[in-house]
């Protein structure tokens, strides 16, 4: 059976909406550590602010790669 891209997009959209609602309704306090990991670069000076969340984005990449691998492995 061929994968149905429309169905997958709807499911992905519902997941994104559920995660957004979770953060909007106060669940964001559980993720307060995100963006403040060791290795995230933050430079603040008067009139200048630079922020590069390197380790946080590596963590997001690893989690998404694992999720996509699981979907491909067990999703059919």
Image (cartoon, rainbow, N blue to C red):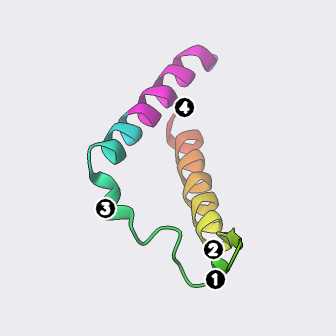
Residue under label 4? 76
Tags 3 and 2 touching, CB below 8 Å: no
Residue drawn at x 53%, y 41% is 71
Residue 17 lies left or right of residue 29; in this view the side is right
Magenta residues (range)? 1-17
How far apart are the alpha carbons under marks 2 and 4? 32 Å
**For marks 1 and 4 on the same chain, the one whose residue lies earlier in the sequence:** 1
Residue at the spot of label 1: 39
Overall secondary structure of the magenta stretch? helix
- Of tags 3 and 4, which is closer to the observer? 3
SS category of the residue bearing label 4: loop
Rounded to the nearest whole Å, what is the CA distance between mark 3 and mark 2? 19 Å
The residue sitting at 51% across, 30% down in the picture is 12
Give the camera-side residue of 51 and 9: 51
| Residue 41 within the segment the image draws in magenta | no
- Residue 1 seen from this side: no
Residue plotted at (58% across, 52% down): 64
């Amino acid at each position: 059976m061929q994968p149905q891209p429309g169905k997958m997009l709807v499911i992905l959209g519902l997941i994104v909406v559920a995660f957004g609602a979770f953060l909007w309704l106060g669940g964001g306090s559980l993720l307060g550590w995100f963006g403040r990991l060791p290795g995230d670069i933050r430079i603040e000076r008067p009139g200048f602010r630079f922020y590069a969340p390197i380790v946080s984005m590596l963590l997001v990449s690893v989690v998404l790669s694992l999720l996509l691998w699981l979907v491909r492995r067990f999703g059919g």
